[in-house]
Image: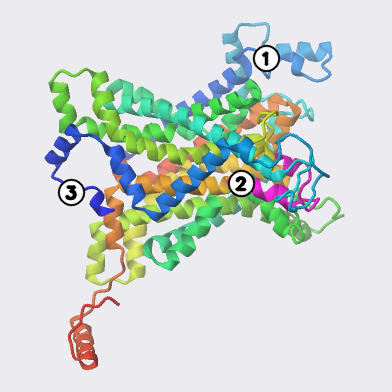
């Protein structure tokens, strides 16, 4: 019963947050003076018929309140408007882009979590020794680099070996599925690596400080006194308890991952949500910008909820 | 480092805090005692001086063409020329000026807002606390860079807008940390005592609470500077920077957009990002030093993780025998 309560509360809070995000989106793009989406003078080459259609769609001749209701209603039907740039529905544009972003970001994130945890644990366990410096200094370096700049550096270093732009080679004619897959994977390496390295730096530092905290606990001292092996102390006592802060900080870094993805996709011309944001900025394609912003906000809120529930599973005390 | 804060009993600590609350001086002591903290501080001071003295130090004015585009580094142009034939070293020094300005100004806004919200929420508690923390939670969860992109784009690009956007949206961590500290301080004796003596809330907050949370604010501010500078480079890279000003972010943007890489002009790409990395490392070395010195648990952790192994009595006896036969004396406890 207690458990259900906690889960319900978190889900409720997340829904409320999503609602606020959706409303903020309305205010930013439609209600502010010079509202970006509903200002028809922004629409390129608009014919009177198109203007009339848009006026009807957004309810521009009605009050702000009923525009808001109309906006929510259209959102429920996943109608985010039409891109000024390619005249396609924003929603289907975003779905395609999301399909490209997710594998690239996932690869980078998994890489960074695995290596970040490993080097973070080593750095904490070997505090004050050369192995700590060997693991912390590169991590601090990657953490300190602007994502987009690190991407450019990797292009300088690996540009002659790996593809640096786009998702697949357009000159590969009639590729077999295997060829196509390896082609896409090759294109994915550099963007994923860029994102992964920056996150790796962050996670190493986080894991290190979380481990330092738990290593100072009495139960670790007790485990040592009992004579357990170092591996067992780390795995069963120190790291297990350090998991809690690590999970919550990784969840908080989701917003950062999204920001990083925007920059990385811009550098490597990777056709995902981030590149969609960049192109929408360049083309003044406000329906796209609005749709991407909404999608990014809602998905980060959703994954934060997921992280909350994982945290609860790890540590039922917080319910 | 341990001696920086003698372990007084709680009551005496309260009394001491009541008499002379000078946590900031203590902070300086712990920074001075730490090599990495001092390194960060010195690097930051040098960079700040360089930025202030930019017109004196920079070899060329920032917006004049002084040679052929993408000329490689030479004696006259230590870091070569960029796509417009501008001297990269001069651009770097002027860009540093703008980036540091954005970093410091935005962080100042964020620290003031965050401290205010944190102290008010933590000190008053109750409904005020719940409302403020709901708002904080929202900004903590929502992805900030897209939000900043949208606001900066709709608002129009200028340096002031960028500063305000970054500052107004990045106060959450400060607010949370300060709130937690304010909540524990609220229950401490010296606060209770001044409340009992009839001090107003404003007086208690400004005279007793704020000085005690100041070190935390400083730590957060220093760490936030790097965040603000990062964000500035990101926004500029996406074309939202001030088109008139050169910053480290716009330098990276230009290198990317104007094909510095395919021209082989690494000297136009590497310096701005490397300088950002140096600033960020310096800030986090200094910030972590301050943070660590405020966290007593990290100090004990430092003592206890020194790896040691329990030996069985037999092993110990064997080692003792060995030591005795080797040196004829009993130095059994020498660390291995």
Q: Distance between the residues labelled 1 and 2?
A: 38 Å
- Quarter occupied by residue A160: bottom right
Q: Where is residue A170 in the image (x, y as percent from the top left)?
A: 83, 50
- The residue at 35%/64% (across/down) is A234
Type of secondary structure dominating the magenta stretch: helix
Q: Mark 3 lies on which chain?
A: B
- Camera-near label (1 vs 2) is 2
Q: How far apart are marks 3 and 1 (CA)?
A: 66 Å
Residue B261 part of the magenta-drawn span: yes
- In the image, is B36 to the left or to the right of B204? right
Q: Mark 2 lies on which chain?
A: A
Q: In this view, does B82 lie above or below A174?
A: above
| Residue indicated by mark 3 | B7
Label placed on residue A147:
2
**Do the CB atoms of the residues marked 3 and 1 lie less than 8 Å apart?**
no
Q: Position of residue A237 (x, y in %)?
A: 31, 60
Observer able to see residue A300: yes
């Amino acid at each position: 019963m207690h458990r259900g309560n906690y889960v319900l509360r978190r889900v409720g809070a997340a829904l409320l947050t999503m609602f606020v995000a959706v409303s903020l989106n309305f205010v930013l793009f439609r209600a502010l003076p010079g509202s970006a989406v509903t200002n028809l003078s922004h629409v390129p080459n608009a014919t009177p018929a198109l203007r009339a259609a848009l006026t009807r769609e957004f309810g521009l001749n009605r009050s702000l309140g009923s525009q808001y209701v109309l906006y929510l209603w259209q959102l429920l039907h996943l109608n985010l408007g039409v891109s000024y740039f390619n005249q396609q529905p924003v929603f289907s544009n975003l779905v395609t882009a999301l399909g490209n972003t997710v594998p690239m970001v996932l690869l980078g994130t998994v890489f960074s979590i695995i290596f970040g945890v490993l080097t973070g644990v080593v750095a904490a366990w070997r505090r004050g020794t050369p192995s700590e410096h060997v693991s912390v200094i590169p991590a601090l370096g990657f953490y300190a680099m602007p994502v987009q700049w690190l991407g450019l550096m990797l292009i300088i270093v690996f540009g002659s070996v790996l593809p640096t732009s786009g998702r697949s080679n357009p000159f590969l004619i009639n590729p077999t599925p295997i060829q196509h897959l390896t082609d896409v994977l090759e294109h994915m390496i550099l963007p994923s690596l860029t994102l992964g390295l920056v996150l790796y730096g962050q996670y190493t530092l986080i894991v290190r400080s979380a481990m330092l905290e738990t290593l100072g606990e009495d139960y670790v001292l007790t485990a040592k006194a009992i004579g357990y092996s170092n591996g067992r102390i780390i795995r069963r006592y120190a790291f297990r308890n350090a998991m809690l802060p690590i999970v919550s900080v990784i969840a908080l870094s989701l917003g950062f991952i999204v920001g990083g993805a925007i920059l990385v996709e811009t550098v490597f011309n990777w056709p995902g949500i981030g590149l969609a944001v960049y192109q929408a900025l360049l083309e003044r394609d406000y329906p796209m910008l609005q749709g991407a912003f909404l999608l990014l906000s809602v998905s980060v809120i959703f994954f934060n909820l997921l992280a909350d529930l994982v945290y609860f599973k790890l540590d039922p005390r917080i319910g | 480092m341990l001696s920086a804060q003698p372990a007084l009993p709680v009551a005496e600590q309260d009394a001491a805090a009541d008499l002379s609350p000078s946590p900031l001086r203590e902070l300086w002591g712990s920074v001075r005692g730490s090599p990495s903290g001092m390194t960060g501080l010195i690097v930051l001071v040098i960079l700040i001086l360089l930025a202030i003295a930019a017109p004196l130090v920079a070899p060329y004015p920032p917006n004049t063409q002084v040679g052929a585009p993408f000329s490689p580094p030479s004696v006259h142009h230590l870091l070569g020329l960029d796509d417009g034939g501008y001297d990269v070293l001069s651009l770097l020094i002027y860009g540093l000026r703008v980036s540091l300005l954005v970093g410091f100004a935005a962080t100042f806004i964020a620290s003031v807002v965050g401290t205010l919200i944190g102290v008010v929420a933590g000190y008053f508690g109750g409904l005020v606390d719940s409302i403020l923390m709901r708002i904080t939670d929202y900004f903590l969860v929502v992805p900030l860079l897209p939000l900043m992109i949208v606001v900066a784009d709709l608002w129009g690009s200028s340096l002031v807008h960028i500063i305000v956007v970054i500052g107004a949206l990045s106060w959450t961590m400060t607010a949370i940390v300060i709130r937690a500290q304010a909540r524990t301080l609220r229950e401490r004796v010296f606060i209770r005592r001044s409340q009992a003596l009839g001090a107003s809330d404003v007086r208690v907050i400004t005279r007793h609470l704020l000085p005690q949370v100041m070190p935390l604010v400083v730590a957060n501010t220093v760490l936030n500077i790097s965040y603000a500078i990062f964000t500035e480079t990101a926004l500029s890279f996406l074309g939202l920077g001030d088109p008139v000003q050169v910053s480290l972010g716009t330098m990276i943007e230009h290198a990317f957009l104007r094909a510095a890489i395919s021209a082989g002009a690494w000297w136009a790409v590497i310096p701005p990002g490397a300088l950002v990395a140096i600033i960020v490392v310096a800030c986090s070395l200094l910030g972590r030093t301050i943070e660590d010195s405020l966290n007593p648990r990290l100090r004990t952790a430092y003592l206890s993780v020194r790896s040691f192994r329990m030996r069985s009595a037999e092993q110990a006896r064997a080692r003792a025998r060995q030591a005795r036969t080797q040196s004829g004396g009993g130095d059994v406890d020498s660390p291995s």
